[in-house]
C-alpha cells in the first residue's frame, strides 16, 4: 500500500517521499522473493489431497473441490517456474519470470474464487 500511495503522490527525485518509496519497493521485492523461496514443496500436500476430493459424492461439489485444488497446485508450480526464471536458472530471463508469476497469480485468484464459492455453497 505504501508503494502505491507514494507512487500516486508522484514525489520529486531526492525528496523524503521518493526515498521512502524506494525503500518500501525494495522491502516489498525482497519479502516477495523470500516468500517464494520458502514455498517450495507446498504443492505436494495439495496434490495428495485431490484423491480425497474425488471421493465426494455430489458431482458439483466434487468438481468444485478438484478444480480449486488443481488451480492452487498449478499456481504453486507456476510460481516456482517464475522464480527460477527470475534467478536465471530456467531460460526466459527476469522479465519472463514476472509474466510467469502474473499467470500464477491469476491461477491463485481462480483457486480463491472457487474456494469462496465452496464455502458459500
Image: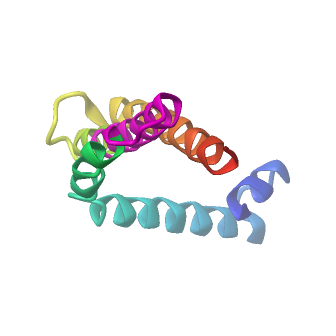
Q: Main secondary structure of the magenta part?
A: helix
Measured as percent of width and height from the top left, residue 52 is found at 30, 48
Magenta segment includes 68 = yes
Please tell me which residue lies in front, 117 or 98: 117
Please state, as top left, top right, bottom left or bottom right, where the C terminus lies in the image.
top right
Please tell me which residue lies in front, 56 or 68: 56
Residue 74 visible at all: yes
Please tell me which residue lies in front, 116 or 32: 116
Measured as percent of width and height from the top left, residue 106 is found at 52, 34
In the rendered view, does 3 fall on the left or right side of 54?
right
Where is residue 34, by image quadrant?
bottom left
Measured as percent of width and height from the top left, residue 28 is found at 53, 63
Which residue is at the far right?
9
- Residue depicted at x 57% and y 39%: 114
In the rendered view, does 51 fall on the left or right side of 109?
left
* Color style of the picture: rainbow
Residue 98 visible at all: no
In the image, residue 50 sits, relative to residue 34, either above or below, namely above
- Residue depicted at x 58% and y 69%: 23
The range drawn in magenta is 54-77
| Numbered marks: total | 0
In the rendered view, does 27 fall on the left or right side of 120?
left
Please tell me which residue lies in front, 53 or 79: 53
Measured as percent of width and height from the top left, residue 82 is found at 31, 40
- Residue depicted at x 72% and y 61%: 1
- Residue depicted at x 50% and y 35%: 64
Magenta segment includes 37 = no
In the rendered view, does 15 fall on the left or right side of 110?
right
Amino acid at each position: 500500500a505504501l508503494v502505491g500511495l507514494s507512487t500516486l503522490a508522484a514525489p520529486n527525485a531526492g525528496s523524503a517521499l521518493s526515498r521512502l518509496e524506494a525503500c518500501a519497493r525494495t522491502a516489498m521485492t525482497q519479502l516477495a522473493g523470500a516468500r517464494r523461496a520458502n514455498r517450495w514443496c507446498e504443492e505436494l500436500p495439495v496434490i495428495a489431497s485431490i484423491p480425497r476430493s474425488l471421493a465426494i459424492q455430489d458431482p458439483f461439489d466434487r468438481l468444485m473441490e478438484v478444480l480449486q485444488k488443481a488451480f492452487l497446485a498449478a499456481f504453486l508450480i507456476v510460481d516456482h517456474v517464475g522464480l527460477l526464471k527470475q534467478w536465471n536458472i530456467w531460460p526466459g530471463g527476469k522479465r519472463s519470470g514476472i509474466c510467469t508469476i502474473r499467470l500464477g497469480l491469476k491461477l491463485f485468484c481462480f483457486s480463491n474464487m472457487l474456494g469462496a464459492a465452496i464455502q458459500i455453497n
